């Protein structure tokens, strides 16, 4: 990794196997050398995860700052997404995304970092899988938030549940880590940056702890 590059990672951890694989997942992230992590399907003190605060435990293992974004109450605790960073985080905000009827709630989490004196707004999300039109509404809300990032500087990671790569055109101001099939990388797990930056060397790391692999890229500042 060269000067002006940082490793970023997105990972749907599927509640860390009920909280049983927190240490192993943290070790995977550390082994990948990631400095910014976008995480989905994180439990906080739920019954199914034995009351563990998964984001806090992972942050402690990594020695990172973190922000947990609650999507809904679940099984006596909370369920949501998280951002982890080797750089200090500030101004964490969670914004609900549109969902109809009784579909699972969705949200966009954001927090700010500064690298080399330059601000970057970080975003994490996990979009609905059930309906393309619903996702289109969610993409529109995400795109609006990206447009409002200070100085237009942002980084977005998540599980987008897309049915095709064409859906990523709904984020017109964002540059994806991958916009066409790459062996070993699922279409739905992706990372985006603003046009003043670049993402290269996108790759996946197989894991036995979730139904998703880790997806990494080098962010060129």
Image (spheres, rainbow, N blue to C red):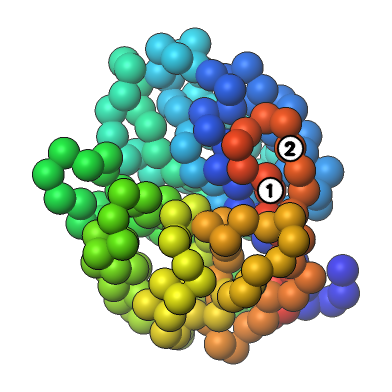
Quadrant including the C terminus: bottom right
Residue found at x 58% / y 65%: 191
The residue located at (42%, 51%) in the rendering is: 126
Circle count: 2
Q: Are marks 2 and 1 in contact (CB under 8 Å)?
A: yes
Residue 17 percent coordinates (x, y): 58, 22
Per the model, the C-alpha gap separating discs 2 and 1 is 7 Å
> Which residue lies under the disc numbered 2?
207
Of residues 120 and 1, the one drawn nearer to the viewer in this rendering: 1
- Residue at 25% x, 52% y is 96
- In-front residue for pair 10/4: 10
Asked if 165 appears above or below 188 in the picture, the reply is: below
Q: Under tag 2, what secondary structure?
A: loop
Q: Which residue is mark 1?
A: 214
Density class for disc 1 (Cα within 10 Å; few <14, some 14-19, many ≥20) is many
Give left or right: position of 208 versus 82: right
Would you say residue 138 is visible in this rendering?
no
């Amino acid at each position: 990794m060269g000067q002006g590059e940082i490793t970023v990672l997105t990972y749907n951890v599927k509640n860390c196997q009920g909280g049983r694989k927190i240490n192993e997942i943290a070790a995977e992230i550390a082994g990948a050398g990631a400095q910014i992590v976008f995480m989905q399907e994180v439990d906080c003190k739920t019954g199914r995860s034995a009351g563990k605060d998964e984001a806090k435990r992972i942050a402690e293992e990594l020695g990172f700052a973190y922000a947990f974004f609650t999507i809904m109450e679940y099984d006596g605790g909370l369920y949501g997404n998280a951002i982890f960073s080797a750089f200090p985080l500030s101004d964490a905000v969670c914004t609900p995304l549109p969902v109809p009827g009784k579909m699972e709630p969705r949200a966009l989490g954001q927090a700010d970092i500064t690298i080399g004196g330059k601000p970057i707004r970080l975003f994490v999300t996990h979009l609905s899988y059930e309906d393309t039109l619903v996702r289109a509404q969610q993409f529109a809300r995400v795109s609006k938030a990206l447009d409002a990032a200070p100085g237009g500087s942002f980084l977005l990671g998540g599980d987008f549940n897309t049915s095709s790569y064409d859906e990523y055109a709904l984020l017109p101001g964002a540059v994806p880590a991958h916009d066409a099939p790459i062996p070993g990388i699922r279409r739905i797990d992706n990372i985006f940056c603003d046009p003043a930056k670049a993402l290269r060397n996108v790759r996946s790391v197989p894991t036995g702890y979730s139904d998703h692999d880790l997806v990494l890229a080098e962010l060129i500042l």
